[in-house]
Amino acid sequence: IADRDLLFLRRHVARLHESEMGDLLEAIQPEQRRQLVSLLGADFDLAALTEVDEAIRLDIVEHLPNEQLAAALGEMDSDDAVYILEDLDQKDQEEILSKLPFTERIRLRRSLDYPESTAGRRMQTEFVAVPPFWTVGQTIDYMREDGDLPESFSQIFVIDPTFRLLGAVDLDRILRAKRGTKVEAIMRETNHPIPAEMDQEEAAQLFEQYDLLSAAVVDENGRLVGVLTIDDVVDVIQEEAEEDLMRLGGVGDEELSDTTIETVRSRAPWLLVNLLTAFVAASVISLFEATIEEIVALAVLMPIVAGMGGNAGSQTMTVTVRALATRNLDIHNAWRVVRREAGVGILHGVAFGLMIGLVAGVWFHDPNIGGVIAAAMLINMTAAALAGIAIPLFLDRAGADPAVSSAVFVTAVTDIVGFFAFLGIATWWFALR
Amino acid sequence: IADRDLLFLRRHVARLHESEMGDLLEAIQPEQRRQLVSLLGADFDLAALTEVDEAIRLDIVEHLPNEQLAAALGEMDSDDAVYILEDLDQKDQEEILSKLPFTERIRLRRSLDYPESTAGRRMQTEFVAVPPFWTVGQTIDYMREDGDLPESFSQIFVIDPTFRLLGAVDLDRILRAKRGTKVEAIMRETNHPIPAEMDQEEAAQLFEQYDLLSAAVVDENGRLVGVLTIDDVVDVIQEEAEEDLMRLGGVGDEELSDTTIETVRSRAPWLLVNLLTAFVAASVISLFEATIEEIVALAVLMPIVAGMGGNAGSQTMTVTVRALATRNLDIHNAWRVVRREAGVGILHGVAFGLMIGLVAGVWFHDPNIGGVIAAAMLINMTAAALAGIAIPLFLDRAGADPAVSSAVFVTAVTDIVGFFAFLGIATWWFALR
C-alpha cells in the first residue's frame, strides 16, 4: 500500500475511523508505519494512536516532528492528548507543551500534574458549564453561538461564580424543558462528583454502580476541573478485568508487541518463585525416599494427588479473586463462602478419593495403596479449598493484590500437603503392617 | 432492620439507589429479603433486581404477586423489564404480559422473541424518532410536549415513513443548531446499525471500536426497532471478561450465592477431565518404574520438571487466550507471536535448566542427574511454549472457546512431556554408562 501513491492513500486511508486506522498501523511493518504516517502528514489523525500498543505509539510519536505533534495535539480532545503526552519523556513533553496556545497548555499541564491512573489524568478538560440562574433558553442560545464547545457532550454542568460544582443537567432534560425554565430547577444535584485524585478503578466502579454516562471531576476545593466520560471508563474496566486474568496466569503487563527478550524478562520472576516452591515440594518428597524405594507405585501415583489438589485449589482461588475484585466478597458473606468452599473440598475429596482409590487399588493389585491414596486425596482436597479461599482473602486484607501471588502460594500448599499426606500416610501404614 | 418498622424503612431504604438496594438485598438473609420486599410493596423499585444474582432475583420475583409485577414492569425501561422477565417460566411470563397495556405488551414480546444474548434482547424499545424534514425547532417543541419519552436518552433517530433508519443526531448537535435547520442536515448517517440478531458480544465490540454511547438496533428489513445503550454494553463487556477468567480457572457460570451442592456439581466435570489426564501422566511414569527403583532421586525431582513446564505453558496460554478474546491475535501476527513464544520457551529452558541442573547436581552429588534434568527442562519448556500457543489457536480455529479447555490440554502436554523427557533421558543415559 505504501508505494507513495499519495492520492490513493489520501482518498482511502485518511478517511478510516481512528480505530480502523489503529488496526491498520498494528498490522503493517514498522518501516511502512513510519512511511505511512509521514506521507499522510497533517491528514494523519493522531487519535488513531490511542488505539495502538504503547510500543507502536512511542515509535510513531518519536518519528514525528514536535511542531506537527503540537499542532495535532492542540486540536484533539484533552484526554486523548494527555494519553499520548504522558508516555513521552520530560524534555519532549515540555517542548511540545511550550508550542501550544496558552489555554491548551494550562489545561494539559493540569491533567499531567495528577498522578497516573487517577481520574484527573483520564478526564477531559473541555466541558460546558452555566450559572444556575440561566434559563433553558439562554443556555440553548449560548450553545448555538459559542464555537468553542467540546466535540461531543451529553451533560452540562451548573457552577457558582467560584467554579464550585452545583449540579448537572442531562441534555435530554434541557430539550424537554420550556425555554423559560431556570437551569437550577431541572438540574440534578451531583451526588457523586469524582475527586481528581481518585484512582481510575474506583471511578469506574462508581460509573458501573450508578450507570453513569459522564461525571464531573472536582479538585480538592470542590471546583469543577473536568469531566470523565463512559468511553474512558469502558477502557478502564476492560484493562482491570484483563489485568486480573493476566496476573492469575502469572504474566504481568506485557503486550503482544513485546520482543522475545522483554517477554523472557517479564515472565522469569514468577517462574523463579515457582521454582523455589517446587524445590520445597521436592525436599518433602526426599524425606520419604526410603518408602519410595520400597514401593515404586507411590512415585507413580503421587503427582495425581498433588495435581488434583492444585486444580481444585485454583478453582476456589479463581472464584475468590474475582469476587474480591468485583467487591462481591466482604465480611457479610465471607464466612458463608468459606463454609461452602470447605464443604465443596470435603465432598470432592470423598468422591474423587474413592474413585482414585479404586482405580489405584486395582492397578497395583493392592487395596492398601487404594486406601492410602483415598485418604490423602480427602486431606489435600480440603486443604486446597481452604488455601484457595484463605490465601487471597489474607493477601487482600494485607493490602496486596490477590491476583498477583495467590496462584504461587495455593500451588505450593497443594503440592506440599499432597506429597506429605500421601507419602506420610503410606510410610505410617506400611510400617504398621 | 426488617422489624416491620415501616416508617423507618420507607424513609431510608426506599430512597436508596437501585444498585445500593441490590447490594442490601444480597447482604441479608432470604427470609429478611422477602419480608423487606413485601413490606416496601409498591415502593420497591424492581430495577434493584437487575443488580442482584440470578438466584436471588428468581426467589424474590416468585414471591411477588403477578399483578404487582406487571404494574411495576410496565413502568420500567423495557430492557430492564425483559431482563427480569426472561428468567421466568413460560406460564408466568404469559400471565404477566397479558396484564400489561397493549403497546407495552407488544414491545416486551418483540424483545423476548429474539434469542438470548442478542442485541434484540438487550435493547431498549423506547426511543425518539423524527422524520428527516423536521426542523430543529419542531423537534425541540415535540420533545417539550410529548410526555411519553424514554427516561433518558442521548440521541434521537431519523426515520422514513416506513420506519427505516436514515441516521441519528446526538443531542448536543441539536442544541448547537439554529431552530430553522433541518434535521437531515445535521444527522449522521448510521454506519453501524446493529442487527437485532447480532450476538451481544459482537455488538459490544462495535461499541468499543467506535466509542459509541448508543446505537440503533434494526430488524432484517432495516427498520428501527430499538436502541442499545452503553450501560448495557458495559455489563456485557464485564461479563465476557469475567467468563474468560472463570473458564481459564476451570469454573463455569457459577455465582457466589450458589449452594455447596450446586458448586460441587458445576466444578466436578473439569476435575474429572483432569483426573483422566493425570492417570495418563501416571502411566507414563510407570513405564520407568525400574529406573526409579534404582535412582530414587528421579522421583524427587520429576515434579519440578513437570511443574515448571506447567507454569510456563499457562503463562503462554493466558496471553494467547486473552489476545484471541480481544481479537488482537490474527493471521497477520500469529506467526510472529508463535516465533516469539518459542524463543521465550527455549531461553527460559536454557536458563532454568542450568539453574535446576546445578542445584540438583550438588544436592544429589551427581553431575549426571544435573545434566539429565537440565536437558529435560529445555525440552519441556519448549514444548510448554508451543502447546501454550498452539492449543488455544487450534481450539479457536475449530470453533471451540479456547478459554474453556486450553488449560486441561496444556497441563496434560507439560506433564506427559515432562515425565517422559526426564525419565526417558535418565534411563537412556544411565544405561549407557
Image (cartoon, coloured by chain):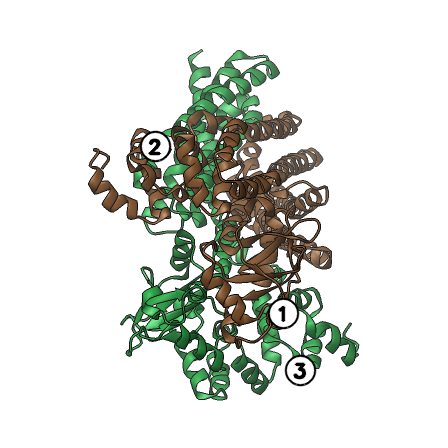
Chain colours: A brown, B green
Q: Chain of mark 2?
A: B
Query: Rounded to the nearest whole Å, what is the CA distance between mark 3 and mark 2?
Result: 61 Å
Question: Quadrant location of the N terminus of chain A?
Answer: top left
- Residue A337: where, in percent of width, then height? 67, 56
Q: Chain of mark 3?
A: B
Q: Are marks 1 and 2 in contact (CB under 8 Å)?
A: no
Label 3: state its secondary structure.
Answer: helix
In this view, the residue in front, A382 or A378, is A382
Q: Amino acid at mark 3?
A: Gly
Label 2: state its secondary structure.
Answer: helix
- Residue A71: where, in percent of width, then height? 42, 38
Q: Which residue is mark 2?
A: B336
Q: Which residue is mark 1?
A: A184
Looking at the image, can residue A418 be seen? yes
**Where A365 sits versus B81, above or below?**
above
Q: Amino acid at mark 2?
A: Arg
Looking at the image, can residue B195 be seen? no
Q: Is residue A243 left or right of residue B284?
A: right
In which quarter of the view is residue B293 placed?
Answer: top right
Residue at (65% x, 77% y) in the render:
B44
Kindly indicate whether the residues beneath marks 3 and 1 are on one polypeptide chain.
Answer: no
Question: Quadrant location of the C terminus of chain A?
Answer: top right
- Residue A159: where, in percent of width, then height? 63, 60
In front of the other: label 1 or label 2? 1
Kindly indicate whether the residues beneath marks 1 and 2 are on one polypeptide chain.
Answer: no
Q: Mark 1 packing: few (<14 Cα in 10 Å), some, or many (20+)?
A: many
Which disc number belongs to residue B41? 3
Q: Amino acid at mark 1?
A: Glu
In which quarter of the view is residue B30 placed?
Answer: bottom right
Q: Mark 2 packing: few (<14 Cα in 10 Å), some, or many (20+)?
A: some
In this view, the residue in front, B422 or A98, is A98
